């Protein structure tokens, strides 16, 4: 019983620490610095993903290879995600754009996929995000709720895009998640869409 209780407390402590982790996104070959107090304990998850170099009152963090790891500096915990320069550039442009919107946030998954979450409140937000993705030639996943007043606009917009590229919608679902099954005009299902 005591072992189970101690294990549960350790698990809850680990969850609370990971919940407070700050996200840090780097491109392969990119570096940044973080402040470090003298004699602070430092822990690093995977040294194959990032390299750290002590610079006295700062730590230099260099992205070595794609992936996700963690860094602990004293009581501060960082979740570090290293991806391609193009993806990181798109993420920063997307984050700057999302600051203008209400209800939406972005993050990069461990698999290197940009995911937008929250609640889509305006159709113009989705259109602006799509235009940004086209300019950067980068995809993103919408893992959002869609406000009921915006739902008909989203349906019409997706249907218009599908039709403009010669596809018809076989099945359209917005809840609990956004899903569209597309079929080309010959009736063949399009895999992976």
Image (cartoon, rainbow, N blue to C red):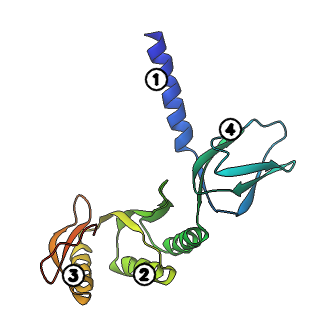
Q: Secondary structure at mark 3?
A: helix
Please give the label number shown on residue 159: 3
Residue annotated with mark 2: 128
In the image, taking residue 191 as reference, residue 133 lies left or right, namely right
Q: Position of residue 36 (x, y in %)?
A: 79, 46
Point out the tag, 4 or 3, that comes first from the N-terminus. 4
Q: Secondary structure at mark 4?
A: loop
Q: Secondary structure at mark 1?
A: helix
- Between the C-alphas of marks 1 and 4, the distance is 21 Å
Quarter occupied by the C terminus: bottom left
Q: 155 or 168: nearer the eye?
A: 168
Q: 123 or 2: nearer the eye?
A: 2
Residue annotated with mark 4: 75
Front of the two marks 2 and 3: 3
Please give the label number shown on residue 8: 1
Mark 4 and 2 residues: CB-CB less than 8 Å, in contact? no
Point out the tag, 1 or 3, that comes first from the N-terminus. 1
Point out the tag, 2 or 3, that comes first from the N-terminus. 2
């Amino acid at each position: 019983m005591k072992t189970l209780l101690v294990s549960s407390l350790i698990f809850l402590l680990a969850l609370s620490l990971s919940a407070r982790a700050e996200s840090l996104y780097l491109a392969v070959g990119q570096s940044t610095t973080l402040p470090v107090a003298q004699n602070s304990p430092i822990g690093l998850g995977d040294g194959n993903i990032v390299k750290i170099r002590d610079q006295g009152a700062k730590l230099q963090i260099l992205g070595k290879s794609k992936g996700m790891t963690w860094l602990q500096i004293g009581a501060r915990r960082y979740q570090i995600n290293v991806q391609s320069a193009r993806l990181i550039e798109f993420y920063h442009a997307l984050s700057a754009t999302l600051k203008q919107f209400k209800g939406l946030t972005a993050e990069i998954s461990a698999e290197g996929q940009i995911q937008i979450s929250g609640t889509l409140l305006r159709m113009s937000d989705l259109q602006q995000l799509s235009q940004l993705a086209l300019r950067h030639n980068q995809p993103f996943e919408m893992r959002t709720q869609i406000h009921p007043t915006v739902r008909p606009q989203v349906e019409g917009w997706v249907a218009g895009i599908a039709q403009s590229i010669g596809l018809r919608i076989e099945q359209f679902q917005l809840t609990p998640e956004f899903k569209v099954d597309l079929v080309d005009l010959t009736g063949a299902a399009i895999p992976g869409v």
